[in-house]
Amino acid sequence: MKRYQRAAGAIAGSAVGDALGGPFEFGPPGAFSARFPSSGAGAGAGAGAGAVDEMCGGGGWDPGEATDDTQMAILVAESLLERGGLDLPDIFSRFQRWAASDPKDIGLQTEDVLTNGMPWDLAAAIHFQVNQRAAGNGSLMRASTSAVHFASAGQEATMDAARRIAALTHGDRTAWEGTALFHELIRVALEDTDPLTALPDILAHVHPDHRGRYATVLSPDWHPDQATEFNGAVWPCLGSAVWALRTTASFEDAIRAAIDLGGDTDTVAAVTGGLAGAYYGLDAIPARWTQPLHVPLPGFDGRVLHLGDLLHLAHRLGG
Ligand SMILES: [Mg+2]
C-alpha cells in the first residue's frame, strides 16, 4: 500500500472517528450499536434507500461535524506547514486563539492551560504543579497530523516531537508518553510494519517510569473493562484504541467497537480512527462517512475544512 494511503487514512480516519463518536460522548456502552445494529456497508456507499446513516449528529454536533480533537489536530498541521517545522510558541498561540473563540467543546485542562495567562513554556507545567492531575487524553487526541509529519524523521524524532507538543497543554509525562506511543505506532504503520506486532519494541522507547503501565493496557490480553480509570485518561484511551484495532478486522468495525465502549467516545474513536486509518488505508474508510465530514475552525475566519482539505494536508505533511 502506498504511504500516502496510510497517511491520509490516519488523518481522515481520526477525523471520521471523532465526528462519529461526538454525539455519543459520555453515553453508555453499546449505544452506537443499539442505534445502528448493522453496518451500512451492505447498503452500499451510495446511501440509497435503506442505507444507514451513522454520521447522525446530536448532542450539539451537526452530522459529520468534527469536534475539538480534530480541530486542534488541524491547528497543529497548519502550524507545522506554515512555520516549516516545529514552532511550539506558534502552536500554543494558535491553540489560544482557538480557545478564545468559543469552540463547542474544549477539554477542561486544555482550556485552563490556554486561558490562564501564563507563557507557552510554563502554562502546562504550572497547571500540573497546582493540580497534580494532568493525565487526560487531550494531547493524544490531536496527534494524527503531527504523527504523519514527523514519521519520516524516524523513531526518536517523532516520539520527541510528540512529547513536546503534548507538553504544551499537559504537564504530566504520562500524557507525553501516550502521545509518543501513538506517533511511533503511526510511523511504523506508514513503513508497512504491523503496529501491533511492533508494540513490544515500541514500548522499550517509553520512559521507564511509565513503561509498565502502558505495557499493561497495550498487552494482547487487556480488555477495556479492566481499565482502572475513565477512558478520558490517557492510558485506557490508548489501550482501548489499540484493543479496538486488534480485536476487529476492518476500519468500520474498529470504530464501532471504540464508540460502543461509551464514555469519551469521540476521543477514543479519534485515536482508534488514526491507528485504523493508517493500518487499513484511506480507501477502507466508507464514503458515507467521509462525505459529510467537516471540521470548523473557530477563531480562524470561519473556515470549515472538508475531506479534500484534509487530504491536501496529508499530502503536504509528508504522506
Ligand atoms: Mg472532542
Image (cartoon, grey):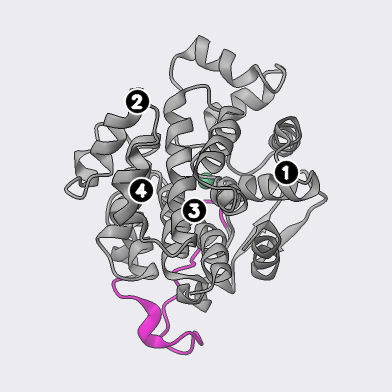
Q: Residue at x 40, y 44 (%)?
A: 264
Looking at marks 1 and 4 on the same chain, the residue that comes earlier in the sequence is marked by 4
Q: Is 132 left or right of 125, judged from the image as shown?
A: left
Of labels 1 and 4, the one closer to you: 1
The residues tagged by marks 1 and 3 sit, at their Cα atoms, a distance apart of: 17 Å
The residues tagged by marks 1 and 2 sit, at their Cα atoms, a distance apart of: 28 Å
The residues tagged by marks 3 and 4 sit, at their Cα atoms, a distance apart of: 32 Å
- The label number, if any, that marks residue 19 in the structure image: none
Name the spot of residue 100 as percent of width and height, x first: 73, 33
- The answer to whether one can see residue 260 in this image is no
Looking at marks 2 and 3 on the same chain, the residue that comes earlier in the sequence is marked by 3
Looking at marks 3 and 4 on the same chain, the residue that comes earlier in the sequence is marked by 4
The residue indicated by pointer 4 is 27
The residue indicated by pointer 3 is 187
Classify mark 1: helix, strand or loop: loop
Q: Amino acid at mark 4?
A: Gly
Q: Residue at x 27, y 40 (%)?
A: 217
The residue indicated by pointer 1 is 85
Name the spot of residue 304 as percent of width and height, x first: 72, 59
**Relative to 92, is 103 above or below?**
below
Q: Residues within 10 Å of mark 2 (few under 14, many from 20)?
A: few
- Residue nearer the viewer, 34 or 193: 193
Q: Amino acid at mark 3?
A: Arg
The residues tagged by marks 2 and 4 sit, at their Cα atoms, a distance apart of: 35 Å
